[in-house]
Image (cartoon, rainbow, N blue to C red):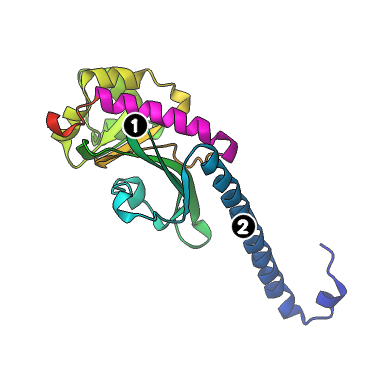
Amino acid sequence: MTLTPALVSLPQWLVFPLGIIALVVIVLVANSYFIRRRREALTSVALEIGFNYEGGSWTNKEQSPHLETALFASGNGPEFRNVMTGSASGFRISLFDFKYTVGAGRESQNIKQTVAAFTRGDLSLPEFAMQPKGLMQKIGNALVHKDIPFDSNGEFSRRFRVRSPEVERTRELFTPELLVFLGTLDPKTKWRLEGNTGTLIVYRAGKRVKPRDFRKFLEETTTLATQFLSLGAARKTLR
């Protein structure tokens, strides 16, 4: 690295900290630029799909989704961005970016994902989280048996893990018909589903959707939510 004349003339003990400060400033400016570009792009996307762009929060708190699931209790420093709201297929729908931080200091990492939240007044979901199993999760489950097993569908239990503080209600939610449907999902999609009360959450962990793919994301998640809630025992009258 070639030092500029200004840096060369500085005392040696100042060169390194000033270099670090300059690097931090560059990173912050670049990050601000990309945040602004994504915000501008998604503002246009919201109009294209008939949604309202609301920014970093919900304008009408009473209409906001019920976000008390595992995702929103993860890590530290939770942050919502690019909230947009609309309706389709009988749902109030929110699409948004959600970020949280794991670790600390140099070991910290920001986890970012785009989330679809589906809310409907007739739903009564237990608090649950369903995700595809990785190799380590399969080994861990075999050792400690913390996942909820579904003996009626061994293939589902092999591919997915389901956890909930409300085990019996969650077993009722995941009907045999729902288990069969979930078993037909392409493993490459790696969808995660979470729910609580009247809201179903659909997302891919650590995956933000590109602005040009938001319409596809909305269509895919709406289809998945519709099938999940029609096949599962999710309505208040079925409790």
What residue is disc 2 on?
Answer: 31
Residue type at tag 1: Ile
Give the spatial CA distance, label 2 vs label 1.
Answer: 38 Å
Viewer-proximal residue, 199 or 52?
52
For disc 2, the neighbor class at 10 Å (few under 14, some 14 to 19, many from 20) is few
Mark 2 or 1, closer to the camera: 2
Question: Vertically, is 39 above or below 173?
Answer: below
Residue type at tag 2: Asn
Q: Where does the image place residue 31, in percent across and percent down from the top left?
A: 61, 57
Precedes in sequence: disc 2 or disc 1: 2
Numbered mark located on residue 29 in the image? none
Can you see residue 153? no
For disc 1, the neighbor class at 10 Å (few under 14, some 14 to 19, many from 20) is few
Magenta run includes residue 211: yes
What main secondary structure does the magenta stretch of the protein show? helix
Q: Where does the image place residue 150, in percent across and percent down from the top left?
A: 22, 24
The residue that appears at 53% across and 42% down in the rendered structure is 47
Name the quadrant of the N terminus. Answer: bottom right
| Residue 38 located left or right of residue 224 | right
Magenta run includes residue 208: no
Q: Which region of the structure is painted magenta?
A: 210-231
Viewer-proximal residue, 99 or 55?
55
Can you see residue 151? yes
| Residue 148 located left or right of residue 216 | left
What residue is disc 1 on?
Answer: 139
Q: Secondary structure at mark 2?
A: helix
